Amino acid sequence: MKQKMASRRVKILVAKLGLDGHDRGALVLCRAFRDAGMEVIYSGLFATPSRIAQIAEDEDVDAIALSLLNGAHNTLFPRVVKELKKKGIKDVLVLGGGVIPEEDKKGLEKGGIDGVFGPGTPLPTIIDYITKGVSKLRKI
């Protein structure tokens, strides 16, 4: 069961899904999250949705930042949400990022992705979104 202490640092899983071998952006996020005081776990390349859900459960994360640049976001992001639900994980903020067309964002959000961020999104914007979102989840 997730420990809901306001004083605990945000623990975030940064995950690279599928056959996307480009991780520069994900590594930039890892560093920015760490510099913002978060505890960061990185999945490494080529993670499956079930592997991401397992890491989230094992590490008791507060948030998951999914990164995908190969265009499979409409398929793989919802699969992560489905795997989390199978495990009964409901109190995790799930974010998606990468090269995601504007017209896909609403569908991803309806499918359980809490926030979608594209290239050029300022890092403080993403960090603020995570901090506020996790804070709300901890009050539930």
Image (cartoon, grey):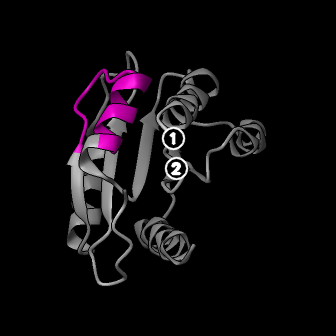
| Residue depicted at x 34% and y 42% | 57
Q: Secondary structure at mark 2?
A: strand
Give the vertical position of 35 relative to 24 (above or below).
Answer: below
Give the vertical position of 12 relative to 99 (above or below).
Answer: below
Q: Write down the quadrant of residue 81 in the picture.
A: top right
Q: Write down the quadrant of residue 62 in the picture.
A: bottom left
Q: Tag 2: Cα neighbours inside 10 Å, few (<14), some, or many (≥20)?
A: many
Residue farthest along the bottom direction in this orientation: 7
Query: In which quadrant of the rendered image does the N terminus lie?
Result: bottom left
Give the side of residue 101 with respect to residue 135, left or right.
Answer: right
- Please state the horizontal and vertical placement of residue 135, each as a whole percent of the image: 48, 76
Q: Which residues are magenta?
A: 42-57
Q: Is residue 52 visible?
A: yes
| Residue depicted at x 61% and y 37% | 100
- Please state the horizontal and vertical placement of residue 34, each as a whole percent of the image: 21, 65
Which residue is disc 1 drawn over? 88
* Residue type at numbered disc 1: Gly
Which residue is disc 2 drawn over? 95
| Residue depicted at x 56% and y 21% | 72
| Residue depicted at x 78% and y 38% | 103
Q: Write down the quadrant of residue 115 in the picture.
A: bottom right
Q: Is 50 part of what is drawn in magenta?
A: yes
Q: Is residue 25 visible?
A: no
Residue farthest along the front direction in this orientation: 1
